[in-house]
Amino acid sequence: MSFLRLVANHIFQRHQTRMDNVWVIVPTRRAVSTFQQHLSEHADTPFLSPHVLAVDDFIMQSAGVLLIDPVSLLFELFEVFKEIDDSLEFGRFLNWASILLTDFDRIDQYMISPSELFSYMTAAKALERWKLELPDGRAPKLETAGTQRYFKLFENLEIAYQALHDRLLAKGWAYRGMAYRLLANRVDELVRDNPAYEKLYFVGFNALSRSEEEIVKTLVKAQKAEMLWDTDSYYMQSRRQEAGKMLRTYKTAGWTGPWTWEEKNLTETPKHIQIIGVPNASMQAKVASQLYRQKPVDDSESSTTALVLGDETLLLPVLYSLGGSVSDLNVTMGLSLQNSNLFTLVDALFEMQRTVAAFQKKDGSGTVFIPKFNHRNVVKVLNHPFIRQYEQVESKASKTAPVRIVQRAINTITTDNLVYLDEKQLLQMGDGSPLFEVLFRRWPDDKPLVIIHQFYALIDVLKEVYTDQQDAIETEYLYLFQNLLRQLETTLEREQRNELVTIKSLKQFLYELIRQTSIPFESEGGSALQVMGMLETRALDFDHLIILSVNEGVLPQSRKLNSLIPFDACVEVGLPTYQDQESVMSYHFYRLLQRAKNVSLLYVTSADAYGTSKGEKSRFIRQIEHELVPASGGNITVSYPTVRFGQLADKKPVMLPFDTLEIPKSDAILAKLKRDLTAQFDPVKNRTFGGIYPTSLNNFVSCSLKYYFSRVIKMEEDDEVSDGMDAAEFGQWIHNTLETLDQEHRMVGEEVTNETVIETLKRKYEETFANRMTESGMNRLLYRVAEDLMVRFNALQAEKYGKNLEVLQTEEEWDAELLVETAIGTIPIRIAGKIDRVERLRMPDGSVQIRVADYKTGKVEAKDADVKTIDLLLTDALKDKARQLWLYQYLVYRKMLQNKGLQFGDEWIDGTKTNVVAGFYSFRNLEGGFMENKLYLGPPEEFVVQTEMHLRKLIAELFDPNQPFRKTADKKICEWCDYRKLCGR
């Protein structure tokens, strides 16, 4: 028989149907409905129920005060401290106010003398306890600035405590602990001598606070109250068992009268306990769902199951895992607003709004702070699930083509590399969208009501999402948040408190309220499955238990007490410590096991789970294994099921070994290759595109699988916005500068001075990195490096070549068409490449050399261009730079032979006596000069014939359906490959 059913029988036998002035006080509101249900079973005709109340409700009602809301309580305390210290800032006050109120609550519940406690914690008393003795008669240095503030706070706490009590009582308000103390001090008048309280039963309690103890003692002594205990001899008779610590004290004291009841359910009731280790916290939800569905088939319809969450943040994962297949369930716990998606959006908005960009002044005289949003914060907000859902809803509702404004804004930020964005830019991206108006309006720092109204507008926008999706939980979160904002707004407006709050303090204040706010699931307890936290299980019994997160540090909680009162002070005055908390949790755990038949205890096995060092199972599990099971004499059995995920053991998954990963060349792939490698014309941009370039050829030669990823399916890394320039951007900036210097100066016969180089470099720097901080940090260092390189390059060119070197062309794309016999027919393949610079060098002997130059800002050595044979060039994957020069030289020779010369602007160069060479300018080795490709394939005609023969062979291999795309065997190539994770390297 369950405990509350036992209590209902006991009370009904005493009073029958005359219970008008009988009061039954239970630990929780959940126990109220269960007791009333059991009591109703004792009579066939209606009768008036006794007054059944949760203990908190009983205290508030009997004390005759109203419970003050958290917002008002914080402001009342602030007003108290402002009278003590007029210089106190609201933001600094919020750092410790909530902790102090929790301490006040404990002080009152345990009826501690404030003067005794706070005087114990003053500086003088602290020094007396520390007994400082210094040599040579020197006086101790009493306090640092930090300890001064610390002790000054405690010197004023008694005054603040009393002043807060006076303010609240004058308004008929009280916080929870204060109400307990008020009733304890006036229990004779308010309850004992009040005829409305004929008989009181205190049901299922275990660790009474001093105020509760005073109330109960007085009423028991007057024979108006009776204590009904729920205890077991297992922990009552063993002094080692912490679950019975407080209860043994009460029983020995004898003030409660007859000890009703103590049973032997833990050791004498048959039980089966499963102890299950799960790899991570959230996976427990899936295991729990499966355990519930696998209940024993011999269960009666009246059997009950409780799914108890040691970690209450698992409520949503548990509800989602149970899904729609489990409809007969009841949730008896709050769903915290702090664990919602709504809170993550609010947090992201505060983080974004507090961003202020620091820019170095151009004259170097200092730093200026500009209110701009950082791209990371903006993209984080735009990628939030609520914002994405809003975009989807808007797109569905659009009568014209859907405009995805959120994705468009993200693309713009990424493409234009917008590191810092101001309000105006973001509103323009929104194109009048109410969403962008709500998200990206700058918040004033000293007007919290404006910020609250912005949140109201955000809620109105998000309502559209939930009107469409009908998500009950998220809709409830919006409703809760709106109520919380209204409460905060009312409190701020009252007594001109608006000026007290900045964005920082408003955030602190709002987060504290959010932490205290949860969705209160309210329903009756007749469901087959009850989902609850450990504290909600008080006085309740279940046939089956599934308890999650039975880890040390969770059940029981880690040894920490969030308090301003030190441990030694708690011990001195009689406040509970973590040791008392652990004994209370131990009682709740073992009491829950007393009448259960089947118990499943889940714990997380992974390291660092819940902040513990080893993902360690709870001491409760160890106690069950080594103490409870032996004491049961065989009535308790334990098993250790293994959790398996994925395919069944008899169905071995087929997995392709990484080293044999291959992609066959289907007809669709071959058709795509043909389409991509032939010339195509874009009339809008007036340019030809498509074909095989040096980079794609290098990818194919080094690793054909890399070619597949990069060119066939065009898999690219996501673009990222960066405040600092990477190697590719640095190289592009240098290329742009050299192109401008060539086109605007060298190619028109103007001399390029150092001043010209510096001015052009600066101009290109500002154009390329206009949206980033460029006056400080790594960008500034790279600028100095680039400036030095460019000036030196210009000087070395002038010194070594003088007027003998002319720039004929810069940053132009060259191409040629090559007919290739492939497995799918003859294809006109376009060979193309963008050449950084074409130069003409007049040699000392009077001959002319056309030089095809490529700039390299990365690491390049002369040996990279020096390849003697074509076979080595085409087989060594690391000769990619030499292959690039080979193709460039081929393209120039091919056009020169085809046209009998080369046309550069208005100038014609006869090709019959022209020598073409290809090489690098390395900006990491400027003194090395022009690093020439040494490959010799004969005179121009022979060079072209040999090159085309080898290109045809390579391209035919690319189109060969019998040769799939496969990874390279040379793992050195994979070291810096973007796709190495895809193929297991």
Image: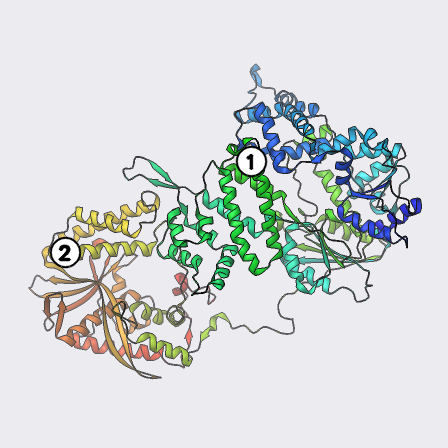
* Residue name at image x 29 percent, y 68 percent: 694
Quarter location, residue 715: bottom left
| Residue 88 x/y as whole percent | 54, 27
Relative image position of residue 235 (x, y in whole percent):
82, 45
Q: Position of residue 609 (x, y in %)?
A: 62, 51
Residue 257, above or below 460: above
Q: Which residue is mark 1?
A: 492
| Above-or-below relation of 119 to 232 | above
Q: Residue furthest left?
A: 846
Q: Amino acid at mark 2?
A: Arg
Residue visible at 86% across and 33% down in the picture: 219
Q: Is residue 217 left or right of residue 799?
A: right
Instruction: Please name the residue that numbered disc 2 is placed on.
Output: 746
In terms of secondary structure, where does tag 1 sit?
helix
731 sits left or right of 11 in the view? left
Pointer 2: residues within 10 angstroms few (<14), some, or many (20+)? some
Q: Residue furthest top?
A: 137
Q: Is residue 346 visible?
A: yes
**Residue 867, can we see it?**
no
Task: Tell me the amino acid under the disc marked 1.
Answer: Leu
**Depth check: 375 or 859 in front?**
375
Would residue 16 appear left or right of 765 to someone viewing this image?
right
Residue in the picture at 31% in, 75% down: 677
